[in-house]
């Protein structure tokens, strides 16, 4: 596969990931009315892991993991799944779906900055300019008395930024494991989501009868799309694109999240939000321009 084709496939995978993850923010906000956060997210993740493992088996991919790789696999599961999904989900107990999505997706800031000292990859001028535009859009969305962060929302801010920082660290320091791609996704989902389910059963005490028909539909969507398809496309993108570039491109996710939350949950969406999203799109487009040698 040529470099150009690999880049095109990687960008297509990022588009699928960004849209699927963006739509999941208002879905999770709705589901929190019926089920506790960690149990709901963890249960969907375990189901997705089983489905992906079944697909891998049908495709003839081995699910075997060499003993020497279990430590790296566990670290990847913690950073990519448990911290990213668990902390992000907890954040919207205090934040709106739009606020949570935007704060969590400051992740590209940390990824771009960490790639410099950790990997020695100095960000290009276009990437930095694009990042400034993206962050300007995010800052604008938080400006004003109504949409600003209140003091009682600080726990949500901490969880959101914790998810962003840890996921960015995983994006930078973790290399693709030398095992079958679908097996890597299935095992990471299983190892990262099992602690969420156990914590949920022991501490959150979910009520199975509290889940409505709409809640069940949200669980099915979360299992098949954000937890299943989108994790497959995310790791596929990381195999074809530089980590910092992939991280910046996912800033499209909060744009999708804000729009979806406005239409489905009635969250704020006016001139300020549209200007902010325009800045974000412009920043992503600038960051995605191929560098010239």
Image (cartoon, grey):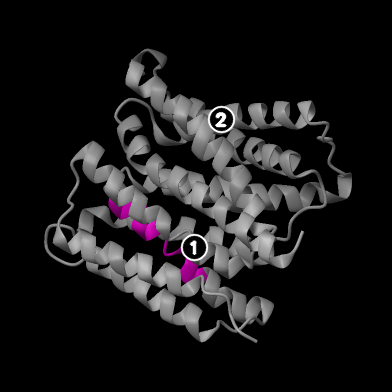
Residue 100 magenta-drawn?
A: yes
Q: Residues within 10 Å of mark 1 (few under 14, many from 20)?
A: many
Residue occupying image coordinates x 75% and y 63%: 2
Q: Tell me the quadrant of the picture where the C terminus can be found.
A: bottom right
Name the residue tied to disc 1: 249
The front one of 108 and 90 is 108
The front one of 136 and 43 is 136
Residue occupying image coordinates x 15% and y 56%: 270
Q: Is residue 33 left or right of residue 122?
A: left
Contact, mark 2 vs mark 1 (Cβ under 8 Å):
no
Q: Which residues are magenta?
A: 98-110
| Image disc number at residue 198 | 2
Q: Tell me the quadrant of the picture where the N terminus can be found.
A: bottom right
Can see residue 149?
Answer: no
Q: Percent from the top left, x then y, of residue 20?
A: 46, 43
Secondary structure under the numbered disc 1 in the rendered image: helix
Q: Percent from the top left, x then y, of residue 158?
A: 38, 58
Q: Percent from the top left, x then y, of residue 102?
A: 35, 58
State the CA–CA distance, disc 2 to disc 1: 33 Å
């Amino acid at each position: 596969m040529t470099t150009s084709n690999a880049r095109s496939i990687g960008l297509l995978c990022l588009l699928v990931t960004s849209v699927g993850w963006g739509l999941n923010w208002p879905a999770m906000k709705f589901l929190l009315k019926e089920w506790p956060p960690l149990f709901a997210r963890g249960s969907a993740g375990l189901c997705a892991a089983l489905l992906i493992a079944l697909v891998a088996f049908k495709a003839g991919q081995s699910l075997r993991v060499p003993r020497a790789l279990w430590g790296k696999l566990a670290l990847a599961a913690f950073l990519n799944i448990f911290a990213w999904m668990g902390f992000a989900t907890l954040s919207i107990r205090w934040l709106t779906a739009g606020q949570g999505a935007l704060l969590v997706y400051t992740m590209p800031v940390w990824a771009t900055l960490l790639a410099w000292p950790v990997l020695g990859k100095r960000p290009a001028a276009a990437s930095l300019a694009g990042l400034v535009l993206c962050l300007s859009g995010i800052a604008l969305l938080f400006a004003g008395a109504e949409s600003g962060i209140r003091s009682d929302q600080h726990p949500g801010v901490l969880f959101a930024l914790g998810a962003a920082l840890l996921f960015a660290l995983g994006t930078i320091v973790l290399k693709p494991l030398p095992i079958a791609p679908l097996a890597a996704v299935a095992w990471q989902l299983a190892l990262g989501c099992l602690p969420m389910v156990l914590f949920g059963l022991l501490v959150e005490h979910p009520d199975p009868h509290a889940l409505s028909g709409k809640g069940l539909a949200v669980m099915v969507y979360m299992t098949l799309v954000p937890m299943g398809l989108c994790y497959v496309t995310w790791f596929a993108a990381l195999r074809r694109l530089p980590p910092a570039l992939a991280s910046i491109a996912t800033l499209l996710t909060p744009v999708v999240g804000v729009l979806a939350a406005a239409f489905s949950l009635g969250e704020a969406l006016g001139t300020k939000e549209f200007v902010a999203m325009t800045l974000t799109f412009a920043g992503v487009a600038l960051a995605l321009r191929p560098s010239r040698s």
